[in-house]
Amino acid sequence: MTHALIAIIILALVFDFINGFHDAANSIATVVSTKVLSPLTAVIWAASFNFLAYWIFKLKVADTVAKTVTPDSVTLMVVASGLVAAIIWNLLTWWWGIPSSSSHTLIGGFAGAGIANAGSFSALQVDKVMPTVYFIILAPILGMIVSWIISVITIHLCRKSNVSQVDRIFRKLQLLSSAAYSLGHGGNDAQKVIGIVGAAMLSHGMISDIDHIPEWVPLSCYTAIALGTMFGGWRIVKTMGQRVTKLTPFEGFSAEAAGAFTLFFTQHFKIPVSTTHTITGSIIGVGLTKRISAVRWGVTLQLIWAWVLTIPVSGALAAIIFIIARKVFS
């Protein structure tokens, strides 16, 4: 293993750690905002289930991410440029408190560096990239529809129940829904980093296929994202948990359950999706059961703009970094 590959693996784990405190807020925002768990307990809870995902999910999403760029366009410099761009954009959006997608940041960075290396868009494996692009829109819509359905059914079943009793029940159920969402987050987001490390190892000739990746790679990636979660992301928790719409324990349960369903569904079909987009759509679906005005559309539009810009901005940034690095090191 060369020094360059070791440096890339370290960079990937740094990104994974940042992803933990950047995106993991999505899995704890509702459980904190409804006061079911304290912030400290919530991050420990989420981190535990992030790590547990290591033993549950196969490397389906990792395989898709590793094949974003054609093999002949992947070099260690391409992977490194994509990672540096992703880390920069993630830190900027975290500092600004914008819940942008770490997933799309990473994929955009990898794709942008690959295109810069090849000199054309032929570097992209379109059949792998397009489902990810489609689900920028479809993931939040699916989360919104499922959460709306769960909410409507639950409201119907509980319409004659005592309000305080229903609140107590859903406080307990929200522990399960947040755990399921954290599992989905770990199984989705840690695998994207596994895919990037796998792409670097493939280009370096260390492995012949993503299925043959050494066991220490996924274990390290799941550990990094769990540790990142432990450090939290309180700026983004506030935006996701209360600024989009006010939540009760019942509503928090509905949003998390819908988000978990969406993540498990897309993971099964090897589609890397944004946990940020997914939980935002789910929270909006809950808000729509009250009234359309319950959703704070001004905040929602700001989030959408961040989503739209993430892939092109991270891609362009990675391309610039790659071009500079090639001139410096060639």
Image: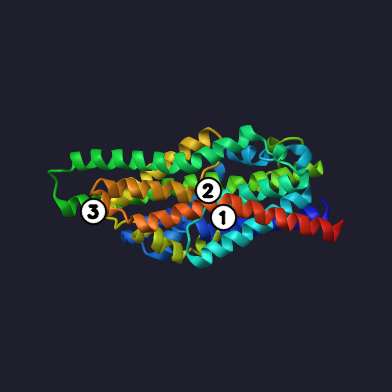
Distance Cα–Cα, label 2 vs label 1: 7 Å
Q: Which residue is mark 3?
A: 168
Q: Nearer the viewer, residue 284 or 37?
A: 284
Q: At 15% across and 43% down in the image, what residue appears?
A: 159
In the figure, residue 121 lies in which quadrant? Answer: top right
Which quarter of the figure is the C terminus placed in?
Answer: bottom right
Q: Is residue 195 left or right of residue 172?
A: right
Q: Secondary structure at mark 2?
A: helix
Farthest residue in the right direction?
330
Question: Three-letter amino acid code at disc 2?
Answer: Gly
Q: Which residue is mark 1?
A: 225
Q: Nearer the viewer, residue 87 or 193?
A: 87
- Taking the image as drawn, is residue 220 in sight? no
**What percent of the width, then of the height, locates residue 139?**
45, 41
Give me the disc on residue 322: none
Q: Residues within 10 Å of mark 3 (few under 14, many from 20)?
A: few
Q: Secondary structure at mark 1?
A: helix
Q: Which residue is mark 2?
A: 186
Q: At 66% across and 40% down in the image, what residue appears?
A: 68
Question: Three-letter amino acid code at disc 3?
Answer: Arg
**What percent of the width, then of the height, locates residue 204?**
81, 44
Q: Nearer the viewer, mark 3 or mark 2?
A: 2
Q: Nearer the viewer, residue 115 or 45?
A: 115
In the figure, residue 149 lies in which quadrant? Answer: top left
Q: Nearer the viewer, mark 1 or mark 3?
A: 1
Cβ–Cβ under 8 Å for marks 2 and 1:
yes
Question: Three-letter amino acid code at disc 1?
Answer: Ile
**What percent of the width, then of the height, locates residue 94?**
52, 63
